[in-house]
Image (spheres, grey):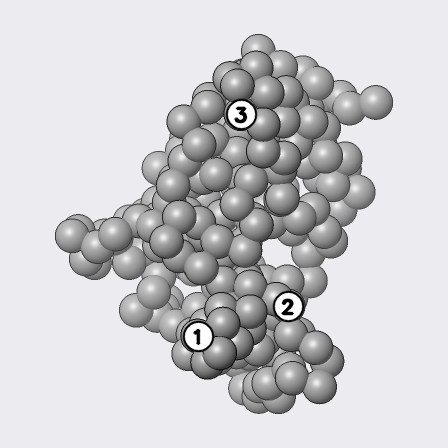
Amino acid sequence: MFLIDMFNRKTTMPAPAEILPGRAEAMEVAQVHAVSGMALTPPYPDGFETACFAMGKFWGAEKCFWSLDGVHVTAVGYSGGTTPNPTYQEVVTGLTGHAQSVMVVYDPVKLCYADLLAVFFESHDPTQGMRQGSDIGTFFRSAIFAMDDAQASQAKAAAGVYQQALAGAGRTASLTTEIMPAGAFFFAESHHQQYLVRNPGGQSGLKPSGVPYPRASSSQVLTPN
């Protein structure tokens, strides 16, 4: 019974009475990105835009984006939950409601949101619910945190495109990706930032479906009905 209770806790979003209180103080964050050398925290250059995704363990998720042409900086953190300024240890209890996530700041002149959505969908398996492979928990769920209505609309269109791609590849599972408005993004502890650069032997934790996102359909993402 103990193991069953632990599993259920990890795969079920916490009730309001279970939410950890957190703290008012923000996390101490690394000053610069370990790959680009850019400042990790705002302000960012004028005209640049921000995207936020959850796709399993955030170490591997961040690496998917930081080398893309047009990406200014990436950071890992916690999104979609309730506890203010949570720690990693609190998040992985499942009692903050957050997902491990990656923030991507990019130049829309060089890189469009549709490109980021394509990387998101094909770099993990968005049909697994509260897990990615053997990584189990609400904090490993698949989610897109939209910064505005335009991003939300594009994300929904992209999800439809990828669901069709999965079906075309013989996959019967449905997407479980959440698409929700972006709330507060809480930066993770400094030692989690660009973890796979600091620890080359570390595991990414990502479990892609193996089905590529159909880039030819990007116009459907950019101009959804």
Name the residue located 41 percent from the left edge and 27 percent from the top edge. Answer: 210
Question: Which of the two labelled residues, at mark 1 and mark 2, occupies the earlier sequence position?
Answer: 1
Q: What residue is pinned by disc 2?
A: 13
Separation of marks 1 and 2 at Cα, in angstroms: 17 Å
Question: Which of the two labelled residues, at mark 2 and mark 3, occupies the earlier sequence position?
Answer: 2
Query: Residue 94, image x and y in percent?
Result: 53, 73
Q: In this picture, is 29 found above or below 157? A: below
- Front-most of residues 7 and 72: 7
Q: In this picture, is 203 found above or below 214? A: below
**CB of mark 1 within 8 Å of CB of mark 2?**
no
**CB of mark 2 within 8 Å of CB of mark 3?**
no
Mark 1 vs mark 2, foreground winner is 1
Separation of marks 2 and 3 at Cα, in angstroms: 27 Å
Residue 220 visible to the viewer: yes
Binning the other alpha carbons within 10 Å of mark 1 as few (below 14), some (14 to 19) or many (20 upward) gives few
Query: Residue 214, image x and y in percent?
Result: 54, 17
Q: What residue is pinned by disc 1?
A: 3
Mark 2 vs mark 3, foreground winner is 3
Q: What residue is pinned by disc 3?
A: 171
For numbered disc 1, what is the local secondary structure?
helix
Q: Amino acid at mark 1?
A: Leu
For numbered disc 3, what is the local secondary structure?
loop
Q: Amino acid at mark 2?
A: Met
